[in-house]
Image (cartoon, rainbow, N blue to C red):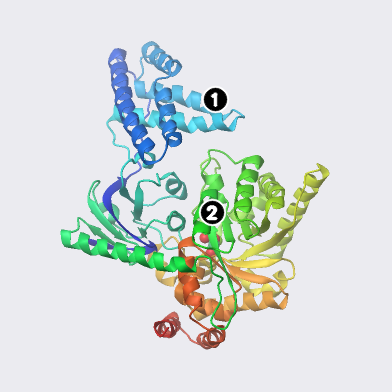
Amino acid sequence: MKIHGVAASEGIAIAKAFVMEHVELDYEKKSVSDPLKELKQLEEAIDQSEKELKVIRDKTAETMDEEHAMIFDAHIQILRDPEIASQVKEMVEQNKVNAVYALYEVTEMFANIFASMDDEYMKERAADVRDVRTRVASHMLGVKMSDPTLIDEEVIVIAHDLTPSDTAQLNKEFVLGFVTNVGGRTSHSAIMARSLEIPAVLGTKNVLEKVKDGDQIIIDGVHGDVIVSPTDQQIKEYQVMKQNYAQIRERLMAYKDQATVTKDERSVELAANIGTVEDVKGVLSNGAEGVGLYRTEFLYMNSDDFPTEDEQYEAYKEVLKQMGNQKVVIRTLDIGGDKELSYLDLPKEMNPFLGHRALRLCLEETELFKTQLRALLRASVHGNLHIMFPMVATLGELRDAKKILEEAKKELIDDDVKVGEYKVGIMVEIPSVAMLADLFAKEVDFFSIGTNDLIQYTFAADRMNEKVTYLYQPYNPSLLRLIKNVIDASHKEGIWTGMCGEMAGDQVASVILLGLGLDEFSMSPTSILRIRELFGKVKYEDMKEMADRVLQFGTEEEVKNEVDRMIEKL
Ligand code: PEP
Ligand code: MG
């Protein structure tokens, strides 16, 4: 059986399906007549959990290292903690309640104690206690948990949706790819897949209904296909495709340390988008010339509470240092839309992508914003920092954000903390800014066009809704004209324009953007070498002519056909 979806991250993977369903465990309080029976069940569940943890521990030591394996030793310790055990026992015996409830109450108390500690290491133990509880409770309740952290063999994850924090938790050693019912090329699970360099097919609508846990699966992230229970012949075919794909990557490696120049010697910059400090490895190994977008919200999403100023400082410093003199654009918190924080209770909104998100939220939660700005300013001494504000809609917002940045800087200087050089720019992802780019250009050092949002706002089409993915139209002349307006306005003021939306790494779009005069292209690290190779085959002057021509077309099909024809001839 073949299922089709959105080709969200390239590559081919062949493995067993791991179906991930979120099951709510029932921790309800119940009276019991036989507490001893409850405690016996609990003991059995603990024994089963220990066996499981030992297997995972040994596998992790084998496939990763001892350091990672130690996490599971800590889980076994929690499982056998005498204090927890005696309190649960006491509660069950004295109050005659079910053991699952007592387990929940006692572990929650311990987790809260850990969470309130100042020591960062101890704080993190709260999540471990809750993890262990989930494991034990699922055995007691006879519920099979599809917890992604438990994956200990090579699999392809199948889910209705993967939130960015689910994706962040996947055990990267074993997850060869993923397939979901919902989502598109620019949803954040797709972005995470590309930064992990694993294939992903999203928005299939019904994969969860069609695939059973353990089914053999092939995913083709180049064409967006998912083959369920393939024949031997199909497995052979895809193995060959997988090899070919690896060979192309190898060929492209020749461009790794080269500059990005067209045949007529125009240089542009190819930078990479990252979500975590670990992603810098992929940036360097794919020969990027800088980081064009560091989405800092993953730092907030991978944590149980707001990251402190020091934690953020360490992360920013690390990225800046690893990138040496190369430019690093760090974007301030862009939460909301499809990105939530478990510890920040944001009211449900009718239209989250049009709501109280990103800079709008930061301008209201000024302490939260200032903590991040202080961390950024402190890190500025370690490299070539560019601070970028997301989701700016008006000049007033930009001025307010810059004012808070100035205040943060003054506070640091008053405290004798050194602040280095840095640049300040904005994302152009709302049409109001693209239209007024000439005036914005006078007040910033750079622009970076965020087409993932700019397209959804220009065409009024939710980027998460697969029914309207046909309106994700990067080649539509209306969008191209908006982009031209931004680039021209920036050049008149002597500042540069980059693009960090997914469009920058798309081959057809990239040559048009080159012709429109875009200065910097920031994309998933794995797209860089392909674009560098392509740019080396074209002349800027020709692309400029082509861009002028396609700006007069009416539909995106016409634009795409014209560019495809040109690329075919190369
Ligand atoms: C964009 O909107 O194009 C962008 C790069 O930001 P994000 O995808 O994080 O919204
Ligand atoms: Mg955006």
Between 565 and 240, the one nearer to me in the picture: 240
Residue denoted by label 1: 113
Q: Position of residue 485 (x, y in %)?
A: 62, 78
Image coords of residue 32 (percent x, y): 31, 17
> Marks 2 and 1, Cα distance to the nearest angstrom?
35 Å
Q: Which quadrant of the figure contains the N terminus?
A: bottom left
Q: Residue at x 20, y 55 (%)?
A: 229
Residue 560 lies left or right of residue 389; in this view the side is left
Task: Count all numbered tags in the image, as a single digit.
Answer: 2
Q: Is mark 1 within 8 Å of ligand 1?
A: no
Tell me the residue that label 2 is attached to.
280
Q: Quadrant of the C terminus?
A: bottom left
Helix, strand or loop at mark 1: helix
Q: Is residue 242 left or right of residue 460?
A: left
Q: Residues within 10 Å of mark 2 (few under 14, many from 20)?
A: many
The residue furthest left is: 232
